[in-house]
Image: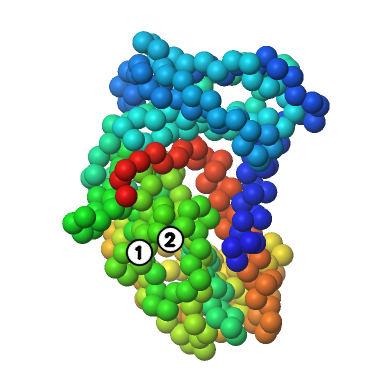
Amino acid sequence: MRNALRFILTGILLLIGLAAVPAAGAQAGGTINGVVMLAPTNTPLADVQVTLEWYEGTTLKQTLQTQTDAGGGFSFTGLAVGGENVYTVSALYKDVAYASDMITLTADAPQKTVRLDVYETTDDDSGIVIERAHLIISPLNEGVQVGQMFILSNTGDKAFIGKPLQEGGRPVTFRMYLPKGADQLTFDAGALGERFISVPDGVADTMPIPPGQSSAQVVLSYTLPPQGSPWSMDYTLYYPVKNLNVLVSMGWIVEGAPLEFAGTMGGEMPFLNYAARDLPANTTLHLTFKSGAPAGGIGSTTATAAPAGSSQRTLLGIAIGLGALLLIGLVTYPMWIPGRQGRA
């Protein structure tokens, strides 16, 4: 699962970052200018550390740093134009780093200007909302494969940096429930014990969540022990959820209020989609999975049980599904990175 998901995510990043890069060799003379502003007051910030990361393809070639001037401005000159060169610029403010989208310089546009908005911080999580939650579930003979994706919004005007669940612990920004028996846990970014930590009944993210709609996301996967039909699973969502999709592999159905059957998602390897909207914080879903097909059918697609030995195909289906969902998030999601040194 880790390799399939990494393959899909790498392809997505290449599509987003390199689709417009010309094939010709690079030339020198490019410039990236910008300004660092404290949002939402639009106040220019002086003496803020700004970092430029220069990638050639997917390889980090060079890292450059500067400080903003009295007007919040910064500039990086002498950059390569064209070829496979891609840049990101990040600004560190109050131990949180905010980064630009990927930047390419071409012969027709060798100079780009970027604006980096930074924010004051808070440990109040009242503005955190799950914009979309996706659970992709595939029961197989050798175990149940589960993929999850959360797209998060911060409705406040400050970056949420989290708070410890217990005295002396690391600040937690987003909690995720794990069903009993969860094993082989992997994340699309970071690892358990680093960015992610264990907490009661699950795991948690420690990355700050900046203000804005769909401003952060988490993708993870794990396995559960083999299950027969029917089998049940409880799942708790600790934050308000605007849109929930529970996707189950063909040959299975899901029962559990307030989910309603909403058709299929996917192409060659489709999943049945059960959806709900506007769930309050701390909602616990009581889900029952049964082999079969939805009442009334699913249109032109025929529901058939997954054959034994199809785990690799199903894993790829989960990875593709998560990759497609991640692509949706990345298109609308400003790139940013953590910079909380010394907060472990």
Instruction: Please name the residue shown 28% across and 36% down the image.
Output: 121
Of the pair 201 and 344, the residue shown nearer to us:
344
Q: Position of residue 147 (x, y in %)?
A: 52, 65
Instruction: Please name the residue shown 30% across and 45% down the image.
Output: 343
Label 1, secondary structure: give it: strand
Of the pair 14 and 318, the residue shown nearer to us:
14
Of the pair 281 and 170, the residue shown nearer to us:
170
Label 2, secondary structure: give it: loop
Q: In the rendered structure, find residue 239 and report the number of the disc placed on it.
A: none
Counting residues from the N terminus, which is met first, the one under dot 1 or under dot 2? 2
For the residue marked with disc 1, what is the amino acid? Answer: Ser
Q: Is residue 301 visible?
A: no
Separation of residues labelled 1 and 2 (CA atoms): 7 Å
Above or below, 58 against 171 in this view is above
Instruction: Please name the residue shown 51% across and 86% down the image.
Output: 227
Corner quadrant of residue 331: top right
For the residue marked with disc 2, what is the amino acid? Answer: Leu
Q: Is residue 53 visible?
A: yes
Instruction: Please name the residue shown 67% across and 49% down the image.
Output: 11
Q: Position of residue 252 (x, y in %)?
A: 56, 79
Answer whether labels 1 and 2 touch (C-beta < 8 Å). yes
**Does residue 15 appear to the left or right of 327 in the view shown?**
right
Residue at numbered disc 2: 192
Farthest-out residue, left? 167
Q: In the rendered structure, find residue 198 and report the number of the disc placed on it.
A: 1
Above or below, 292 against 213 in this view is below
The crowd level at tag 2 (other Cα within 10 Å; few <14, some 14-19, many 20+) is some
